[in-house]
Image (spheres, rainbow, N blue to C red):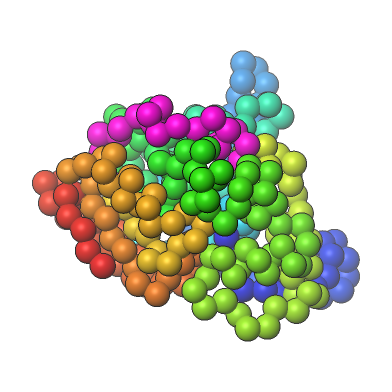
Amino acid sequence: MPPPPLPATARGRSIFSFAAARDRCFSRRFFKAGLRPLAIPIPTGDDPATIVHMWVPTNPPRNPLLLLHGFGASATWQWAPYLHPLIAAGFDPIIPDLVFFGASCTRLPDRSDAFQARSIKAAMEAIGVTRFGLVGVSYGGFVGYRMAEMYPEGVERVALVCAGVCLEEKDLADGLFPVAGVGEAAALLVPRRPEEVRRLVRLTFVRPPCIMPSCFLRDYIKVMGSDHIQEKTELLYSLINERQLSDLPKISQPSLIVWGEHDRVFPMELAHRLKRHLRENSRLVVIRNAGHAVNLEKPKDVCRNIIEFFQEPVAEASNDEKV
């Protein structure tokens, strides 16, 4: 999900770029919060074909909480507002870039959410973390759900924020979404031109900026959104093609479902569908006056619900709904 628009320039040029400056600012906030960046090679045989970049606590984590971002800019942009509240509440955030976002990449052809899950789990093991809570936003929620299914012994609880894991490919043709096919969805979520960014912002925010100058948007695209466009498109095709709810396993962990009341990317129907799928093992929280970018529009509300969910006893961490 894109941040508010920023002024224009191209990566690597001497001309000042607000997007690049803001990226450096977010990195400094992570350093000040006691996190450090690591590039972790994930070997395939003797070949480290995959690199996972992640921000990890300087000291060994005692209460690790894995935060998985959605489509858009790198993880620092999406999780910066959550650092200090989570740390103050006693959590140790671990924040990776998913593969083909930020500084994470692979030479392997697999584009599935299962591959993302294996890569992140291997990176967690590489830093010595075997059990953890997990929060996933949008696409990060798809990966997080898959991790919970594949590694029930490692993932203790799950919070899914506007993560449409219960969607089916036929939902696109049935008109549930603002797009009618996977190709159109890819064009929406991987914007290449200013007008495409405008459309995405207007769909994901209840109150989008009134003015979004093209020069600002071009700067954002060049600095934060121009890498791995083809690979990100392939991630979406892998995620949606032939997807059916009947194939989705139920996860066993207590689960928090957080949704923006006016989400138009993944409408509320998918939130209720997921609640029915997980039944008594889940809680649904609806955030009013927020859209798909609820993590950016209402970070305090989202963060408060995350903290409450992960702090309460297991027996209480399920089976209710609130707005």
Residue 233 position within the rendered picture, expressed as x and y whole percent measured from the top left? 68, 42
Task: Give me the residue at 26% from left, 43% from top.
Answer: 276
* Horizontal side of residue 218 vs 79, given as left or right: right
Residue 114 position within the rendered picture, expressed as x and y whole percent measured from the top left? 50, 30
* Horizontal side of residue 306 vs 167, given as left or right: left
The single residue placed furthest to the left in the displayed view is 315
Residue 83 position within the rendered picture, expressed as x and y whole percent measured from the top left? 43, 64
Q: Is residue 80 visible?
A: no
Q: Nearer the viewer, residue 118 or 168?
A: 168
The single residue placed furthest to the top in the displayed view is 45
Residue 150 counted in the magenta span: no
Q: Is residue 19 above or below residue 136?
A: below
Task: Give me the residue at 76% from left, 57% from top.
Answer: 192
**Quarter in which the C terminus is drawn:** bottom left
Residue 208 position within the rendered picture, expressed as x and y whole percent measured from the top left? 57, 76
Q: Is residue 189 visible?
A: yes
Q: Nearer the viewer, residue 35 or 163?
A: 163
Residue 240 counted in the magenta span: yes
Q: Nearer the viewer, residue 247 or 55?
A: 247
Task: Give me the residue at 66% from left, 55% from top.
Answer: 188
**Quarter in which the N terminus is drawn:** bottom right
* Horizontal side of residue 112 vs 187, given as left or right: left
The single residue placed furthest to the right in the displayed view is 14
Indicate the quadrant where residue 98 lies. top right
Q: Is residue 162 above or below residue 44?
A: below
Q: Which residues are magenta?
A: 236-255
Task: Give me the residue at 30% from left, 32% from top.
Answer: 250
Indicate the quadrant where residue 172 lies. top right
